[in-house]
Image (spheres, rainbow, N blue to C red):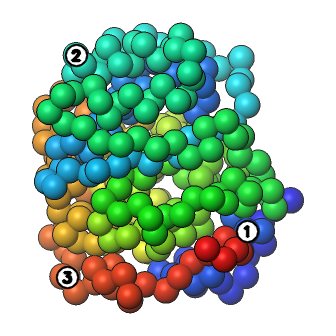
Amino acid sequence: MEPQINADTRRQEQGECGKIDAELLPVKIQFLGDSRDAFRWDLLHWLCSRSAPPFSKLLFVPLLTPPDPSLRHGQTPHTRFPARPEIQDFVGSLRAHPEGLNAIRRLGRVETNWSFDVVIHAPDTVIHDGIRRGEYWRGLQQPLYGNTLLFLDPDNGFEIKSDRGNKWVLDAEVAWLLCELPPSSIVVVFQHWPHRPWNQVFEALLPRLPLASYASAAYDHSSAFILLARDLQTAGTVDVAVRAYAHGHPTVHYKPLKPLANRGAGLAGRNPGNRRRLSLGRDK
């Protein structure tokens, strides 16, 4: 069933934090340990540990879909991406790890001098389409996750006009997460290369992020990670970290989508009291 658009969703699209019902809201383990995983966890570990101050928690939302034996990119060796040695060891251990996704919790302890907690939302749950999609998000209490990097890992990335199935994260879901998270936290979204120039992808995405005061991308030839924040102070710390990461990796590029230099200092995101509450049709 296709989610219906009502006035609350239209307010979200215009940059206002309103109420979104569960009916409107609405990866794969087989890819663990491939080259995209090396990029994924190397970047996320860097952002969590090298931001100043560092993030105390990584909240991983896997958005699991059923395995697809026809896809082959999960067979790409992790060593093809130039991750740091400790991350290469970590990623290399994932493919055959008996704990599956739960093994990712060890990411926060791969360095003795830099540590953070890793929480996995619904590690054994597949996300559905339509009305049942809202069930996936129940139990995720964003207000409790201050100083957290929340990572959304859909199969393909942001929704597109031709398809809004379980392989994509919905714009409404990203907006809800941004509104509910404390100002000290950020959202990072995986985006698969959709076989057109990255500049066109980013240009089309930008108008759909009205609630983000800051947005940037770290990307290579096949994958991008979109960084989103509402609070400028938080955005400033992570922007320094992602720029440094791209500078140290010849295959990774940095793209400012909503640069800090173009934003004012007095945003509602700095003050949690100024944020209107979004919900998934449930009380918390």
Name the quadrant of the C terminus.
Answer: bottom right
Whole-number angstrom distance, CA of label 3 to CA of label 2: 40 Å
| Vertical comparison of 144 with 88: above or below | below
Of the residues tagged 3 and 2, which is closer to the observer?
Answer: 2
The local secondary structure at tag 2 comes to helix
Can residue 250 be seen in this snapshot? yes
Report the disc number at residue 85. Answer: 2
Q: Please name the amino acid that badge 3 sits on.
A: Gly
Q: Please give the residue where the numbered disc 1 appears in the rendered image.
A: 22
Q: Earlier in the sequence, mark 3 or mark 2?
A: 2
- State left or right for residue 106 relative to residue 192: left
Q: Which of 105 and 189 is in front in this view?
A: 105
| Vertical comparison of 138 with 68: above or below | below
| Vertical comparison of 269 with 233: above or below | below
The local secondary structure at tag 3 comes to loop
Q: Please give the residue where the numbered disc 3 appears in the rendered image.
A: 264
Whole-number angstrom distance, CA of label 1 to CA of label 3: 33 Å
Query: Where residue 270 sits: x, y (%)?
Result: 28, 79
Query: Where residue 260 sits: x, y (%)?
Result: 19, 68
